[in-house]
Image (cartoon, grey):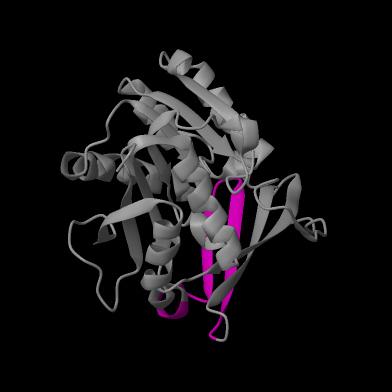
């Protein structure tokens, strides 16, 4: 096998975007879509206008659009949005779906104020916010985009998961692509640093290597509650991932459901 070309860590998802869904990440969005039905039955949204923050390749946004929602997908990665737009172009629901390139902390004109009944931010996207200030900015932006009475649904990995359940090394091998994940948890700041190394190619023509550095931070649930409240989002529930049970000491992921107050409330 010819040697892999050298690489240094790049902006996350620059090279990974075309491989993201096929590497197994699609499964989480499909599960989230099913779970969202359960959450909305318990916590109804006031309308059918949705924004999916950190939408990635657009799986959840597209599924909502196919159910009749008017959907905006927002992401800060142009390569990920390119994948999302390509998928939307081949869908009959594409006319109900738009994608915008923006930072979910400061979306600016990309997200009009009070324009959405539902805002989602899933697959531990919020764990990538490494300071409380950045996390708070995400909540303020979501609250600003929501109409009065609008619902916010978001998840985060817990410290227990990052420290004890996220393995130190994982290998995913499939035709044309090999992915290696090496992780380290720092208990002093509750962050997990993962170096994702991908090899794209085949044994005949050789492989091209890329490296991406992914850093996630866990926050105490009480801190998240307080930041949501400060942004004007009242927490209605915290759930153990993909259930309607409360989180426990060994919960790996928490889903938050919060609501923006009605006008004048």
Residue displayed at 43% across by 70% down: 223
In what quadrant of the picture does the N terminus appear?
bottom right
In what quadrant of the picture does the C terminus appear?
top left
| Location of residue 7 in the rendering, given as x and y in whole percent from the top left corner | 80, 58
Front in this rendered view, residue 222 or 159: 222
Is 247 on the left or on the right of 69, as rendered? left
Location of residue 62 with respect to 207 vertically, above or below: above
Residue 226 lies in what quarter of the image? Answer: bottom left
Q: Is residue 243 magenta?
A: no
Q: Is residue 181 magenta?
A: yes
Front in this rendered view, residue 79 or 170: 79
Residue 39 lies in what quarter of the image? Answer: top left
Residue displayed at 71% across by 59% down: 211
Bounds of the magenta span?
163-187
What secondary structure do most residues of the magenta stretch adopt? strand
Location of residue 14 with respect to 147 vertically, above or below: below
| Location of residue 159 in the rendering, given as x and y in whole percent from the top left corner | 43, 75
| Location of residue 151 in the rendering, given as x and y in whole percent from the top left corner | 33, 41
As drawn, which residue projects farthest toward the front? 264
Residue displayed at 28% across by 42% down: 36
């Amino acid at each position: 096998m010819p040697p892999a070309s050298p690489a240094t860590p790049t902006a996350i998802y620059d090279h990974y975007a075309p491989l993201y869904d096929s590497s197994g990440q699609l499964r989480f969005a499909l599960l989230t879509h099913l779970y969202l039905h359960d959450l909305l039955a318990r916590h109804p949204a006031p309308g059918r206008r949705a924004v999916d923050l950190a939408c990635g390749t657009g799986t959840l946004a597209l599924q909502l659009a196919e159910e009749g929602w008017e959907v905006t997908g927002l992401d800060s990665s142009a390569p990920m949005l390119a994948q999302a737009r390509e998928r939307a172009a081949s869908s009959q629901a594409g006319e109900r779906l738009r994608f915008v390139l923006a930072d979910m902390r400061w979306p600016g004109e990309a997200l009009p104020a009070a324009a959405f009944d539902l805002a989602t931010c899933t697959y531990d996207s919020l764990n990538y916010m490494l300071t409380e200030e950045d996390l708070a900015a995400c909540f303020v932006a979501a609250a600003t985009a929501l109409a009065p009475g609008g619902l916010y649904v978001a998840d985060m990995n817990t410290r227990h998961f990052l420290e004890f359940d996220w393995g130190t090394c994982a290998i995913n091998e499939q035709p044309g692509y090999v992915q290696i994940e090496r992780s380290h948890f720092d208990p002093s700041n509750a962050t997990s640093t993962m170096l994702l190394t991908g090899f794209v190619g085949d044994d005949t023509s050789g492989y091209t290597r890329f490296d991406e550095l992914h850093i996630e931070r866990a926050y105490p649930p009480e801190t998240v509650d307080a930041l949501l409240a400060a942004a004007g989002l009242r927490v209605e529930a915290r759930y153990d991932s993909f259930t309607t049970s409360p989180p426990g000491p060994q919960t790996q992921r928490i889903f938050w459901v919060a609501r923006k107050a009605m006008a004048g409330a």
